Image: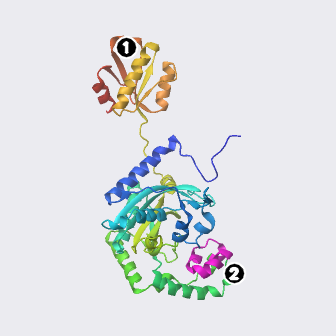
Amino acid sequence: MAIQAPKGTKDILPTESYKWHYLEDKFKNIADSYGYREIRTPVFEYTELFQRGVGETTDVVQKEMYTFLDRAGRSLTLKPEGTSPAVRAFVEGSLYNEAQPTKLFYFTPVLRYENVQKGRLREHHQFGIEAFGSKEASLDAEVISLAMRIYEELGVEGIELNINSIGCSKCRKEYNDILKAFLQEQYDNICDTCKTRFHKNPMRILDCKEKSCREIVKDAPLMLHHLCDECSEHFESLKMYLEGLGIGYRINPLIVRGLDYYSKTVFEIINKNITICGGGRYDYLIEEVGGPKMPAVGFGMGIERTLLTLSENGIEIPKLPYIDLYIGVIGDKARIKALTLTNKLREKNVRCEYDHMNRSVKAEMKYANKINARFTVVLGENEIESGTAKFKRMEDGQQFEISLEDLSAILNLTRM
């Protein structure tokens, strides 16, 4: 039996990879226009980073991380999310000493042991934005506007932005006491995981996926109604900036997000009842992993879910021609000339392919069609002796007779 890819993973074959290239170029170009620079972090980190940053009471840490001991007995974890490693790199690289804000973007695999979902695999991929150094709600609005612009430029309609505030450490503490008082009477009915959360982080119970817990918390008091003055003013400022940018939103007081490092702003972007982007502010994470006290805000956008969103909205990613020129060969005498010409054109960045299979001319043209070659030429003894060949444009069959020594003319043809 042939070895298969592990459950929850998927190969990205050449028939699909062009879509990824398109999205990555789109993401990068938009991020560049907002002043964000790329960062790349390791695929595994010390487990402590995620325990301290993501939170020990989250599903990610309790149930979903791929954690193992290396040969020296150190606990390592495959990256379950992108923000904590970016923050660790920000601190370790002393980027906090540079002029602020520091604005970063990344593409990263994300690995979580969870049930395979629509558009979410055990190994999936994210485009992420992280902005460090400013506590102003204008930066929250900028991050949100960047995400919204991506979907706008991709042509996705029916996008809904949901926002909420989950407060700061000060008002969160007071709210937790209120929430615990509400949940106390139902303590015996919540799941075992939430019983642990009740003592360590009761707000996490609001994010539980168990049906019984969701039913219990539907009438729970809301953090949005217990914000301190600072958090309330920040949330009002965010709404003002979004309205100034012409970005519509819906306040959803039940958004908590699944990671403990969030504070104040949290948001989700939804299309057809699927969350396709989520993020928010995390003003304590930099300090938590050993850096200075410094605020930050960011988001993660699933690439697989973005591709799914495009598909479900009937949006096709343009497929670029694979080959500019296919060179076929008749007879051994023409092979060296054909291969030499192929190499010269490739040096000039022409996407050129040569027949390595000793096909017949008919089979060569059939193959050229399959790989969507824009132009073809067949070199045989007559072409070698005359020094000219007829180049055929596959789209309409028009032929162009060009000297095989006139490289510039061939280049101009392939760039038509």
- Report the residue at 52% width, 66% height from top: 49
The crowd level at tag 2 (other Cα within 10 Å; few <14, some 14-19, many 20+) is some
Q: Which amino acid lies under the numbered mark 1 shown in the image of this protein?
A: Ile
> Which class describes the residues within 10 Å of circle 1: few (<14), some (14-19), or many (20+)?
some
Main SS category, magenta section: helix
The mark that comes first in sequence, 2 or 1, is 2
The magenta segment: 191-213
Residue 85 located left or right of residue 66 = left
Q: How did the renderer colour the structure? A: rainbow
- The image shows residue 250 at horizontal and vertical percentages of 44, 73
Q: Residue at x 51, y 70 (%)?
A: 53
The residue that mark 2 highlights is 189
| Tally of marks | 2
Q: Which SS class for mark 2? A: helix
Quadrant of the rendered image containing residue 333: top left
Whether the residues at callouts 2 and 1 have beta carbons within 8 Å, the answer is no
Q: Please state, as top left, top right, bottom left or bottom right, where the N terminus lies in the image.
A: top right
**Can you identify the residue that label 1 sits on?**
384
Image vertical order of residue 254 relative to residue 321, above or below: below
Q: Amino acid at mark 2?
A: Asn
Q: Is residue 200 magenta?
A: yes
